[in-house]
Amino acid sequence: MSLVAALGVPTPYRRVYTWIRDLGNEDAVRLTRALDAAPAYQRANALRDSAREALGDAADIDFDLLIPALLSLRAQLRGKAGMSVAEALSKSSDLDTGTEEQRLRLRDRVAELLDTEAIVTTANAIALLTEHDRNFHAARILTDIRPVFGDDVEARPTGAVIVEMLNIETWSRSGTADSLYIAMDETDLLDLREQVDRAIKKTQAMKETLEASKITYFELDEDDL
């Protein structure tokens, strides 16, 4: 399958690429320089702030979509050169790329942005961190009181049990979402808390190990998705 055929452009991001195409030359240079100067493995909100600082709030663009659009594009075709991805984007049937001159302008600008170290490293880190069948999205615990009846169900209940229902919502890289319900009691909750506390301590120890080894670690937040 060709890159053009394989490339999908999500609807919310399409206007971002049109904006990049139509950006003035000086602003386009400022944007590329801002992302090029950003450190590797930056969170999306930090990259967003760098872009906004370079162009100013007056720029006619949703900065909250700009960086996710670039990260999504870079991650879609991992291992490919930025120019190859940008060429595929400029020929995508999902976009109205305009004249040939406008198409080439879009291609060249996107290629430069995709090759900045911050975009490359952050996109690769996000892809690796979320490359699973299911990724955690949210959780809540519902507490129920369930009456216990005797043999005579017309009589009042003689007792009750407390059921903690753990609801875990997940998402996949393909865009599907799922929800899992797990019944628990107080003992289960205490065990779960112990395991979570243990995992947090291990994570902190690994962070300290990476910092001592001068290896940058990446943490995901909602803006990176």
Image (cartoon, helix red, strand yellow):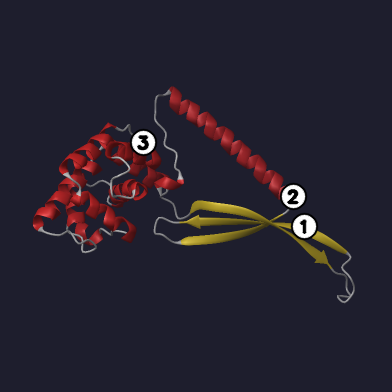
Q: Where is residue 51 shown, x and y percent of the image?
A: 30, 40
How many numbered marks have been drawn onto this rendered protein structure? 3
Q: Where is residue 45 shown, x and y percent of the image?
A: 40, 41
Q: Does label 1 or label 2 sit earlier along the sequence?
A: 1
Residue drawn 24% across and 52% down?
A: 19
Mark 2 highlights which residue? 186
Dividing the picture into quadrants, the one containing residue 219 is: top left
Q: Does label 2 or label 3 sit earlier along the sequence?
A: 3
* 10 Å crowding of disc 2: few (<14), some (14-19), many (20+): few
The label shown at residue 41 is 3
Which amino acid type is marked by label 3?
Tyr
Mark 1 highlights which residue? 162
Q: In which quarter of the image is the N terminus?
A: bottom left
Distance between the alpha carbons at the discs numbered 2 and 3: 40 Å
Residue drawn 58% across and 38% down?
A: 199
Helix, strand or loop status at disc 3: loop
Vertical placement of 153 versus 114: above or below?
below
Q: In this view, does 75 lie to the left or right of 100?
A: right
Q: Can residue 81 be seen in this view?
A: no
Mark 1 in CB contact with mark 2 (< 8 angstroms):
yes
Q: Is residue 201 left or right of residue 30?
A: right
Please identify the residue farthest to the left as the structure is shown: 101
